[in-house]
Image (cartoon, rainbow, N blue to C red):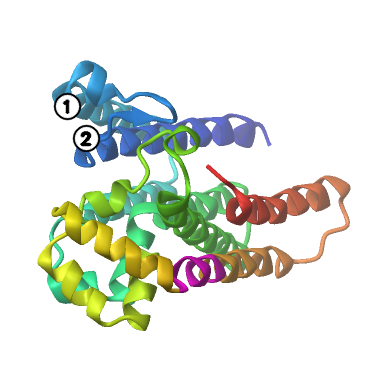
Amino acid sequence: MLILCFALPLFFITGLSKVVASLLHDDVLDDADTRRGIGSLNLVMGNKISVLAGDFLLSRACMTLASLKNTEVVSLIATAVEHLVTGETMQMSTSAEQRRSMDYYLQKTYYKTASLISNSCKSIALLTGQTAEVAMLAYEYGKNLGLAFQLIDDVLDFTGTSSSLGKGSLSDIRHGIVTAPLLYAMEEFPELRTVVDRGLDNPANVDLALEYLGKSHGIQRTRELAAKHASLASAAIDSLPENDDEDVQRSRRALIELTHRVINRTK
């Protein structure tokens, strides 16, 4: 028990550091000017300082993680960091066919967002001495929660405002990034594929793509997919071994409530 009292806070700090580091790097890649309503670090201090700050946080997080002396957990989080890089690479180097693929999009989304959450959840289960079955359920919870979160994030890029999102609306499409709402719109309107292939760096093509999106069910279908993954996350919690302890029950209710908050958030 004493080990866990030290291990869990350390793991939380490690995970938080990796998340902040990934956001710093993300803002550089996206040329973001703001982060949650305030000037992004890359805007204030420049890209070089922002990248170095992210690298520093990653290195400190890895050192802290190593102090847990659990090789399986270290391996899981190292995998998550590898996935972050892989996801960014997939986003930056897509072919025309890949940009139109929902499977490719979901794989990239898992790497960029859901891998860190799922592997962190699994790691916590392992650190607390849970069985392999429980650890896998924790992984499934984090994976589906992460996918739901990113799907809603992609919806909000179209429906949110700059003040609520803390970044410019339509950020993804203006950077040529095709997300689930547009992918669903392309299923309904195949001619949209030609618009996307011509390049979203052209404002006229962006306006035309948005026109097709507005006529489609892309936003609605993306929300439905997010709700499906949120439901799968809740199901993973419901599948955990029965436990009558009130604290355990309260924690499980909180985890399920989190899935509802993720799909109902507005920023």
**Residue hosting label 2:** 28
Residue 155 image position (x, y, % from top left): 45, 57
SS type, badge 1: helix
Which one is in front, 103 or 4? 103
Say whether residue 218 is magenta. yes
Q: Amino acid at mark 1?
A: Asn
User: Residue 141: where, in percent of width, then height?
Assistant: 58, 61
Q: Secondary structure at mark 2?
A: helix
Q: Amino acid at mark 2?
A: Val
Q: Is residue 161 left or right of residue 57?
A: right
Q: Are marks 2 and 1 in contact (CB under 8 Å)?
A: yes
Tell me the quarter of the picture where residue 189 sits: bottom left
Q: Name the N-terminal-most of marks 2 and 1.
A: 2
- Quarter location, residue 232: bottom right
Magenta segment: 217-224
Residue 47: mark in rendering: 1
Q: Residue at x 50, y 36 (%)?
A: 164
State the image coordinates of residue 61 (x, y, percent, origin top left).
Answer: 37, 32
Q: Residues within 10 Å of mark 1 (few under 14, many from 20)?
A: some
Q: Which one is in front, 140 or 178?
A: 178
Q: Is residue 65 left or right of residue 124?
A: left
Q: Is residue 67 visible?
A: no
